[in-house]
Image (cartoon, helix red, strand yellow):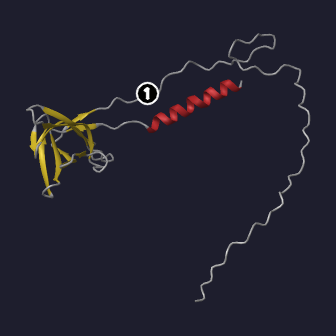
């Protein structure tokens, strides 16, 4: 019977936990707004970039792939996935960053380069709402009473209740009180005379 209650508690906890993780819809935006820092000159520049458009910021070529915001009724959460390439000396380009930027925490999730820093500020112009799939709790099979008659044999892995006999008690262990070791007096520390 305990197994039935344990399973019922687990199912109830997962249903309650699943209610709190429902995701809100996102708005897909056609334009991303970034700020960039040139560490050599100390200039900060704000610039707008269209989705899938490549722009040059200093020596870096940046392409935002998506830019999402939340509806005004939700907690703000502006995110953008970008790819940043840097031209190498042999004429090829080297991918220096590919990942998500979060406007809420630019210090943690911005592009850090030896010469340039880029971070997401906002997304603009979005009207297309992308509905997030709502999570539905997984349906579990009904709980069955797993109590068995005492004559039923257990299966491997089952936790069995002890039968009518009890195990013998372990022998008593005698303990003695702890004795504190005697302290030995060592030589006294030298005294430094400061009366000069």
Question: Is residue 91 found left or right of 195 in the rendered image?
Answer: left
The residue beneath circle 1 is: 136
Give residue 93's position: percent from left, percent from top: 13, 33
Give residue 31's position: percent from left, percent from top: 14, 41
Q: Which quadrant of the figure has residue 44?
A: bottom left
Pick the residue in front: 168 or 27: 168
Q: Going 9% across and 42% down the picture, which residue do you hit?
A: 56
Crowding at dot 1, Cα within 10 Å, few <14 / some 14-19 / many 20+, comes out as: few
Q: Give the secondary structure at mark 1.
A: loop
Q: Which quadrant of the figure has residue 131?
A: top left
Q: Which quadrant of the figure has residue 68?
A: top left
User: In this figure, what is the number of numbered marks?
Assistant: 1
Question: Is residue 181 found left or right of 155 in the rendered image?
Answer: right
Pick the residue in front: 120 or 98: 98
Pick the residue in front: 106 or 117: 117
Q: Going 45% across and 39% down the picture, which residue do you hit?
A: 20
Q: Is residue 152 above or below residue 162?
A: above
Give residue 53's position: percent from left, percent from top: 10, 36
Q: Going 16% across and 47% down the picture, which residue do you hit?
A: 33
Q: Quadrant of the N terminus?
A: top right
Q: Is residue 42 above or below residue 95?
A: below
Q: Quadrant of the C terminus?
A: bottom right
Question: Is residue 36 found left or right of 140 in the rendered image?
Answer: left
Give residue 78's position: percent from left, percent from top: 26, 44
Question: Is residue 120 found left or right of 161 in the rendered image?
Answer: left
């Amino acid at each position: 019977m305990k197994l039935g209650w344990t399973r019922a508690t687990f199912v109830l906890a997962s249903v309650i936990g699943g209610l709190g993780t429902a995701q809100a819809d996102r708005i897909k935006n056609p334009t991303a707004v970034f700020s960039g820092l040139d560490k050599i000159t100390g200039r900060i520049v704000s610039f707008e970039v269209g989705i899938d458009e490549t722009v040059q910021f200093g020596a870096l070529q940046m392409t935002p792939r998506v830019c999402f915001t939340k509806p005004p009724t939700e907690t703000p959460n502006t995110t953008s996935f970008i790819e940043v390439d840097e031209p190498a000396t042999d004429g090829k380009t080297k991918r220096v960053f590919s990942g998500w930027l979060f406007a809420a925490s630019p210090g943690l999730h911005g592009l850090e380069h030896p010469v340039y820093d880029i971070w997401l500020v906002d997304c603009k112009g979005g009207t297309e709402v992308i509905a997030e799939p709502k999570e539905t709790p997984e349906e579990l099979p009904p709980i069955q009473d797993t109590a068995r008659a005492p004559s039923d044999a257990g299966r491997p892995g089952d936790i069995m209740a002890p039968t009518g006999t009890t195990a013998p008690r372990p022998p008593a262990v005698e303990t003695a009180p702890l004795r504190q070791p005697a302290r030995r007096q060592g030589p006294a520390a030298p005294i430094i005379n400061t009366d000069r």
